[in-house]
Image: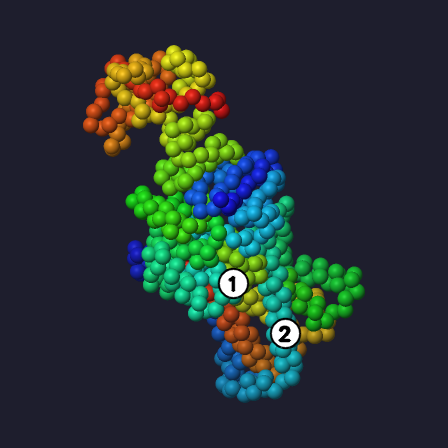
Amino acid sequence: MTTAVLFDNVSRHFGIVRAVDRVNLSIAEGEFFAMLGPSGSGKTTCLRLMAGFEQPTGGHIEIFGETAEGVPPYRRSVNTVFQDYALFPHLSILDNVAYGLMVKGIGREERRKAAEDALAMVKLPGYGTRRPGQLSGGQRQRVALARALVNKPKVLLLDEPLGALDLKLREQMQEELKSLQKSLGITFVFVTHDQGEALSMADRIAVFNDGRIQQLGSPEDVYNRPKTRFVADFVGSSNVLSADLCRRLGLKAAFASLRPEAVAIAPPHNGALSLSGTVASQSFLGATNRIVVDVEGARIAVASPATQGFPPIGSAVTISFAARDLYPMDDA
Amino acid sequence: MRSEKSNSAPLGLKIAAAAGLAFMHLPILLIFLYAFTTEEKSYQFPPPGLTTQWFAVAWNRPDVWAALTLSVKVASIATAAALVLGTLCAAAVSQTRFFGREAVSLLVILPIALPGIITGIALRSAFSIADIPFSFWTIMLGHATFCIVVVYNNAVARFRRISGSLIEASMDLGADGFQTFRYVILPNIATALLAGGMLAFALSFDEVIVTTFTAGQQSTLPIWMLEELIRPRQRPVTNVVAMVVVIVTFLPILGAYYLTRDGDQIAGAGK
């Protein structure tokens, strides 16, 4: 399989700030790749390194086997969907979408047709004569997508493209992006701070923190088998069990992660592990209740089905979970 | 923002406003009135009679034409130079970060805050030290110093409203630096440049102080008028020319006002 984007020990330092620090990754052609992390973790800088808006201070970048260092953005077969969409306010929607073709010198009629096709693809046919200011946020985002895709990029970079949309629209766009990527077969590199978005859309996820990749793997891997405390905490707010608790449960590891939904408030059966504690707090989340149980000072969150109701705060409970849901990890 | 509270101002305020306007504009109307007087030696009020003959006289005076042509030429070239330099300066200050950026932006604005007489003296000594003979070009250079400021101020305000990602988006879509300037930056700053250029032209057109220090034997239109007032010859001709100057400077300023007012929606609509 061809490698679309390759980062070999890439760093980008701004003075003493190590925005990106010795990052290695290799994105396969046709892959939907997510870069997940909190703000300031280096994920957007990585995207900008791929787009060519930043140059690495160390390491080597290849895009489809060609060295990318020193190649300006306008000579890369990569297009970006910007976080603020960056539509040109003085141009009509059609001219916005056709912009990339226009600067390449493609004829008026041909680029009009291509732009209309692209608008139809993002389900905005007939919007060509409007101005960006007349469109809603969701529509602008589709235009930004069409404007990038009309150039037939080899890699499409998306910088938190769904961040400004409301929940309903975001879920709809997630599905559309996913199916668009499948049908076009283009490599998508997606930056987000929303773990749910990364988990539901990506083929593989790189979790960033402090300019470094903490873990790189499939959504399932990253979610169920976090390698570090940061990943456990950031991706789905796992419980992190201390060495003490691990030892009591018969596990030889510095730390272990435990998903809230793997824990039940019930006596153990079939050889499950159990701990006892008192209910410290609870909150209603809709489908589930989040109940925090205090086990000798360690707080363990439990996602319990809403149908089970709330145990009273302060009451003694037994929590149980299967040994295989306890996942040992390195300290970090 | 328009207030919808009340449509009518109190009577006292109306009178005060009318008095203020009269104070500012009646003298100008007097200038216009004397352009039509039949008395050519002194400004007596009321004028003994009205005539339009001075327009014809002014039309046929070569010294008027020489001064007018010089003023238009100086203003045009100073404005053109200011448009190029002011825009480049605004682009650098608003789009990039570099050491001393704040100082540069202050230094660019300084010439307009400095009294004209200082600018004039400074330029005059600089020109004589550099052995540059006073000519059309020295007048033009003197005017360009404050024309740049006007263009810069207009351009920098507009540049700040252009989101940086617009330029990145253009490059990302395959446009090189020149294409990005031509298709994205220029359309977004065009009205600001037009407004700045018009203001610069108007400023240059009626400038006296700096010109007196940087001109040789030539007179621009305002200098010519000053000389006419001191050594009058067919006095009302000066008034005719004054009317022309008012109109020539007023129209671009009005135009600039409308352009920048509508421009509010242009660059801010990107998000």
Identity of the amino acid at label 1? Answer: Val
Q: Chain of mark 1?
A: A
Counting labels gives 2
A250 or B17: nearer the viewer: A250
* Neighbourhood count class around disc 2 (C-alpha, 10 Å): few under 14, some 14–19, many 20 upward: some
Q: Is the residue A14 above or below the residue A299 in the image?
A: below
Question: Mark 1 and mark 2 in contact (Cβ < 8 Å)?
Answer: no
Left or right of residue B68: residue A116: left
The label on residue A103 is 1
Distance, label 2 to label 1, CA atoms, is: 37 Å
Taking the spot 68% from the left edge, 62% from the top edge, the residue there is B120
Can residue A154 be seen here? The reply is yes
Left or right of residue B184: residue B83: right
Q: Chain of mark 2?
A: B
Judged from the image, the secondary structure of the residue bearing numbered disc 2 is helix
Taking the spot 35% from the left edge, 23% from the top edge, the residue there is A325
Mark 2 vs mark 1: in front: 1
* Neighbourhood count class around disc 1 (C-alpha, 10 Å): few under 14, some 14–19, many 20 upward: some
Taking the spot 47% from the left edge, 32% from the top edge, the residue there is A215
B159 or A29: nearer the viewer: A29
Residue B37 at x, y percent in the picture = 52, 83
A90 or A161: nearer the viewer: A161
Judged from the image, the secondary structure of the residue bearing numbered disc 1 is helix
Q: Is the residue A266 above or below the residue A119 in the image?
A: above
Identity of the amino acid at label 2? Answer: Lys
Q: Which residue is mark 2?
A: B73
The label on residue B8 is none
Residue A87 at x, y percent in the picture = 43, 56
Q: Is the residue B14 above or below the residue A279 in the image?
A: below
